[in-house]
Image (cartoon, rainbow, N blue to C red):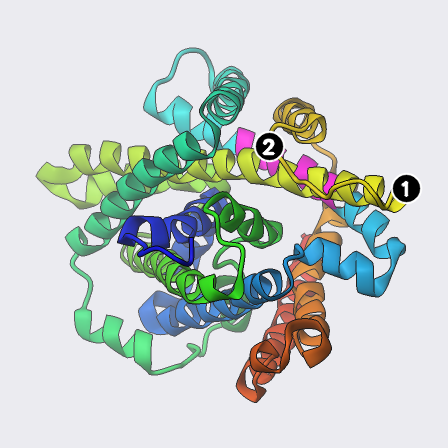
């Protein structure tokens, strides 16, 4: 791929996937809540959060293109097999809770768009239906169809959310001040919400999936690093725009609830706020929210099985070093995990496990700090990535900053979970 001229769409393709997968109901809700509580004064936090996620994802791409190994493979090679099995435990727990949350969110959003039965029944029906549709799209269409569907979804949600924010007529002077003058309002809980806003930009475990997407695009060598940096800038810029728009929307409308329920409540408030445009705005926003949640679900269903397939490919090679290392969407391990991801988390549509959710809060808070440590160590040594592509002083400082910030954000998230 590095020996031919890249079209713009090909170059930014994986960046679109990063944006579409990383923005779900929880991210939209966090932005809206932060806007309601703090106004537009904290818009700068969205930009900082997106910038930190860019640094982490760029480091992952740089490692893979410089070494030819996935980050999981590098971790196992340099930190040992306990990391491999610890990662598997984390992957299974993460998959269950995120899969369950996504099915629930798409169920609630779909019920608001097209109610068939009661809210509870619709949540289960639509959650299972969309999970099945995602499996069919991944299996029958492969990466190319997946990327096209994601492109359409992100275009819809981007257009709707940005248009809604503009239609609410915020004070653009305050918006620009919030973007470029970092302040935290003197309000109880302001620091907590600012940290949540920064930490909620983009994905967590799905950051690792970027490495498999660029392989699908044929990016194999360090010459493709420039293309990765361009599409990551584009992807996280899109993510930041979503976050900024949701904060603006929340600053103009008082919202309550949580997750997808908050999104539905927000749509109802839009109808009342925008007068003659209200009904159209409500339904357009719900369609945009549906696009955001479904693209996130589809992105997780398509990408996370790569991680499981990579795990078993490593295990196979450890048993027989002559075995060729392959991570394929056609492998039995990828297909098996795809079906497991699409079905087992559906249990959460009927049940709630409060103690297990607290455990997930702890485990979830660990991932980004651990990723920052891994990139500091692996990309910090010339013997691994070469002197030219090792972390610069600035990159190391940013990774340390990301480590410290996400440890703090994780601590706040755990405290909130256990005090709630």
Dot 2 crowding, Cα within 10 Å, few <14, some 14–19, many 20+? many
Dot 1 crowding, Cα within 10 Å, few <14, some 14–19, many 20+? few
What separation in Å lies between label 2 and label 1 (alpha carbons)?
A: 22 Å
Which residue lies under the disc numbered 2?
Answer: 329
- Residue projecting furthest to the bottom: 393
Drawn side of residue 225 relative to residue 415, left or right: left
Q: Position of residue 365 (x, y in %)?
A: 68, 59
Q: Which residues are magenta?
A: 91-103
- In the depicted structure, whether residue 98 falls above or below residue 404: above
Q: Position of residue 263 (x, y in %)?
A: 39, 40
Magenta-colored stretch includes residue 319: no
Q: Earlier in the sequence, mark 2 or mark 1?
A: 1
Q: Nearest the camera: 414 or 98? A: 98
Q: Any mark on residue 245, and which?
A: none
Asked if one can make out residue 255 in the rendered structure from this viewpoint, the answer is: no
**Residue 144 picture quarter:** top left
Which residue sits at x=19%, y=54%?
Answer: 168
Which residue lies under the disc numbered 1?
Answer: 319
SS assignment for the magenta stretch, majority: helix
Q: Nearest the camera: 7 or 23? A: 7
Q: Nearest the camera: 37 or 228? A: 228
- In the depicted structure, whether residue 83 falls above or below residue 118: below
Drawn side of residue 397 relative to residue 86, left or right: left
**Residue 199 picture quarter:** bottom right
Which residue sits at x=65%, y=60%?
Answer: 413
Drawn side of residue 318 relative to residue 348, left or right: right
- Residue projecting furthest to the left: 276
Which residue sits at x=61%, y=82%?
Answer: 396
Circles 2 and 1, Cβ within 8 Å, touching? The answer is no
- The local secondary structure at tag 2 comes to loop
- The local secondary structure at tag 1 comes to helix
Q: Position of residue 105 (x, y in %)?
A: 50, 33
């Amino acid at each position: 791929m590095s020996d031919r001229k890249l079209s713009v769409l090909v170059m930014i393709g994986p960046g679109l996937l990063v944006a579409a997968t990383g923005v779900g109901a929880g991210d939209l809700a966090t932005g809206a809540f932060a806007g309601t509580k703090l106004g537009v004064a904290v818009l700068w936090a969205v930009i900082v959060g997106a910038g930190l996620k860019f640094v982490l994802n760029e480091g992952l791409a740089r490692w893979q293109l410089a070494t030819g190994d996935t980050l999981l493979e590098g971790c196992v090679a340099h930190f040992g097999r306990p990391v491999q099995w610890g990662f598997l435990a984390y992957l299974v727990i993460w998959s269950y809770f995120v899969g369950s949350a996504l099915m629930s969110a798409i169920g609630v959003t779909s019920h608001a768009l097209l109610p068939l039965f009661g809210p509870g029944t619709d949540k289960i029906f639509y959650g299972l239906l969309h999970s099945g549709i995602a499996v069919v799209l991944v299996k029958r269409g492969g990466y190319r169809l997946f990327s096209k569907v994601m492109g359409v979804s992100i275009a819809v949600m981007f257009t709707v959310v940005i248009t809604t924010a503009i239609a609410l007529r915020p004070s653009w002077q305050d918006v620009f001040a919030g973007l470029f003058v970092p302040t935290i309002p003197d309000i109880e809980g302001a620091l907590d919400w600012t940290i949540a806003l920064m930490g909620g930009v983009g994905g967590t475990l799905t950051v690792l999936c970027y490495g498999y997407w660029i392989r699908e695009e044929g990016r194999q060598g360090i010459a493709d690093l420039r293309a990765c940096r361009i599409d990551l800038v584009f992807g996280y810029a899109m993510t930041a725009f979503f976050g900024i728009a949701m904060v603006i929307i929340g600053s103009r409308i008082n919202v309550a609830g949580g997750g997808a329920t908050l999104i539905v409540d927000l749509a109802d408030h839009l109808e009342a706020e925008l007068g003659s445009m209200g009904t159209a705005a409500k339904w357009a926003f719900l369609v945009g929210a549906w696009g955001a949640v479904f693209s996130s679900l589809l992105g997780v269903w398509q990408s996370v099985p790569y991680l499981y397939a990579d795990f078993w490919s490593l295990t196979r090679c450890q048993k027989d070093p002559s075995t060729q290392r392959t991570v394929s969407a056609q492998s039995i391990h990828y297909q098996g995990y795809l079906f497991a991801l699409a079905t087992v988390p559906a249990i959460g549509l009927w049940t709630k496990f409060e103690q297990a959710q607290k455990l997930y809060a702890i485990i979830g808070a660990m991932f980004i700090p651990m990723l920052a440590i891994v990139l500091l160590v692996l990309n910090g040594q010339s013997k691994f990535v070469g002197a030219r592509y090792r972390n610069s002083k600035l990159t190391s400082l940013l990774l340390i900053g990301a480590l410290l910030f996400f440890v703090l954000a994780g601590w706040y998230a755990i405290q909130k979970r256990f005090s709630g």
